[in-house]
Image (cartoon, grey):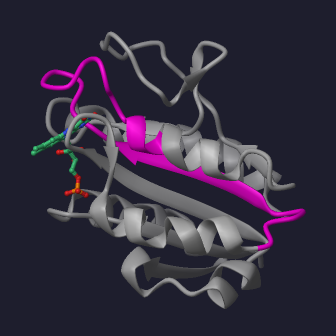
């Protein structure tokens, strides 16, 4: 069994629900979910595989609890870890900053010796700009529970079939 930590920050519960759904789909593995306001450095360092999830607030801001935990993420030794990201946003109301929070997480971990896995095609999404797009793909799974919740299940399943074999 692969040991996987899911760390999520959620203001109104959408990201929390998605974290639960991802955990259910990974139930054949050893999965631990942690709400990010409870996050400790030793928790992060205990998992060889991590899934980090955030929503976006304000105009392109990281979810509030993640803001507080960003220092923990920066301080942690992530060397050799496999890390997958997911982000929630609203592409209709915030087309210029769609899932920017996920982009902030990516920028925070990208040079810390870990492998960021699970990039996701932008095909089928409608938005104008996103800090979470690098080389024409999202740096992780982008979800829109406000306007495209009908696509969520299939997007999660596709993404998990990509990341699970890459976890160690
Ligand atoms: C005041 C406000 C600001 C938001 N800003 C953004 C934004 O800049 N970009 C984006 O993609 N989504 C934005 N959203 C949408 C949220 O990220 C989305 O509703 C998300 O599902 C909330 O997840 P949570 O309940 O887990 O926090 C915003 C929503 C609100 C209400």
Q: Please indicate whether residue 27 sits to the left or right of residue 126 in the image.
A: right
| Residue at position x 37%, y 35% in the image | 99
Q: Please indicate whether residue 72 sits to the left or right of residue 2 in the image.
A: left
Task: Classify residue 77 by image quadrant.
Answer: bottom right
| Residue at position x 50%, y 70% in the image | 7
Regarding residue 160, the answer to whether it shows in the image is: no
- Main SS category, magenta section: loop
| Residue at position x 74%, y 85% in the image | 46
The picture places residue 39, in percent across and down from the top left corner, at 50, 83
Regarding residue 102, the answer to whether it shows in the image is: yes
User: Can you say which quadrant of the picture contains the C terminus?
Assistant: bottom right
**Residue 25 or 97: which is nearer the viewer?**
97
Membership of 108 in magenta stretch: no
Q: Is residue 11 above or below residue 123?
A: below
The picture places residue 6, in percent across and down from the top left corner, at 53, 70
Q: Which residues are magenta?
A: 77-102
Total marks drawn?
0
The picture places residue 141, in percent across and down from the top left corner, at 50, 39
**Residue 28 or 100: which is nearer the viewer?**
100
Task: Classify residue 81 by image quadrant.
Answer: bottom right
**Residue 27 or 47: which is nearer the viewer?**
47
User: Can you say which quadrant of the picture contains the N terminus?
Assistant: bottom right
């Amino acid at each position: 069994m692969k040991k996987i930590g899911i760390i999520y920050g959620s203001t109104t519960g959408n990201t929390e629900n998605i974290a639960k759904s991802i955990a259910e789909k990974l139930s054949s593995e050893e999965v631990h979910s942690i709400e990010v306001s409870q996050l400790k450095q030793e928790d992060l360092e205990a998992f060889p595989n991590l899934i980090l999830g955030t929503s976006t607030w304000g105009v392109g801001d990281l979810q509030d609890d993640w803001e507080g935990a960003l220092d923990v993420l920066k301080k942690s030794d992530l060397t050799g870890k496999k890390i997958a990201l997911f982000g929630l946003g609203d592409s209709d109301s915030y087309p210029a900053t769609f899932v920017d929070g996920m982009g902030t997480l990516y920028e925070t971990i990208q040079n810390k010796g870990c492998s960021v896995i699970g990039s996701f095609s932008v095909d089928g999404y409608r938005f104008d700009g996103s800090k979470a797009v690098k080389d024409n793909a999202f740096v992780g799974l982008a979800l829109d529970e406000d306007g495209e919740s009908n696509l969520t299940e299939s997007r999660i399943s596709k993404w998990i079939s990509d990341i699970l074999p890459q976890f160690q």
